[in-house]
Amino acid sequence: MNLREKYGIPENAIITIAGTVGAGKSTMTQALADALNFKTSFEQVDDNPYLDRFYDDFKTWSFHLQIYFLAERFKEQKRIFEMGGGFIQDRSIYEDTGIFAKMHMEKGTMDPVDYATYTDLFEAMVMTPYFPHPNLLIYLEGSVADIISRIEERGRPMEQQTPIAYWEEMHERYATWINTFDACPVLRLNIKDYDLLENPNEIENIVKQIGQTTNR
């Protein structure tokens, strides 16, 4: 009996991984997909036509970038469900509006009218009974010190060069967001409780927790 059957996880389940940079979303996505024999859905950034423009001028391009992300994530969510599920998804559609767009509006790099338009569109597209929400969102959390340590050890050069104050702010924003998130069931995992790179077999305990959460 494989792990999916052992812990009663439906073969058509869709599980989304969320958390700030450094939490290990990609590692968790691949490990769970391997353990459950599920497909993966990773964020695609190489073809994003707004990303370079956005980094050159936040204020001009933040709205365009968020609309692009919303459209791409919506299409990907639709594709996953049309394929019959059985997916582990790296990054959720919910984080963009709850964290990033809100941050740009509050910092003055997105016009309040644009922000209102964006959130209205998000609500109409996503926060409805017709949108296929995942069966479970796994939130990877840890202390600011643990997250920064991960970034310093394993992060991309751009992430390692980012001021620590930015990661502290993102940590706080993620914590605020997850405490009010209710679009689907949530399983919170502390990154200090496992290390899938050093001990891949620890994935079974996580699969067990998934089964317990989804079968409530």
Image: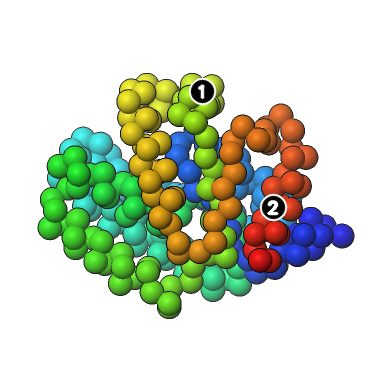
> Where is the N terminus found, in terms of image quarters?
bottom right
List the single residue furthest toward the right. 1
Can you name the residue that lies furthest to the bottom here? 130
Q: Provide residue 87's location: percent of width, then percent of height.
A: 60, 60
Estimate the x, y position of residue 50 in percent, counting from the top left: 27, 47
- Which residue is pictured at 33% across the width and 34% down the height? 169
Could you tell me residue 197's position as x and y percent? 68, 32
Instruction: Give yes or no for contact between labels 1 and 2 (Cβ–Cβ under 8 Å).
Output: no
Q: In this view, does 68 lie above or below 160?
A: below
Alpha carbon separation for disc pair 1 and 2: 26 Å
The amino acid at mark 1 is Ser
Q: Name the residue under label 1.
A: 149
Kindly tell me whether residue 50 is visible in this rendering. Answer: no
Residue at which label 2 appears: 209
Residue 156, image x, y percentages: 46, 28
Q: Please name the residue shown 61% across and 32% down the image.
A: 192
Question: Of 208 and 60, which appears nearest the observer?
Answer: 208
Which-is-in-front pick, marks 1 and 2?
2
Residue type indicated by callout 2: Gln
Residue 98: which numbered mark, if any? none
Q: In this view, does 72 lie to the left or right of 109?
A: right
Q: Is mark 2 on a helix, strand or loop?
A: helix
Image: 186 above or below 81: above
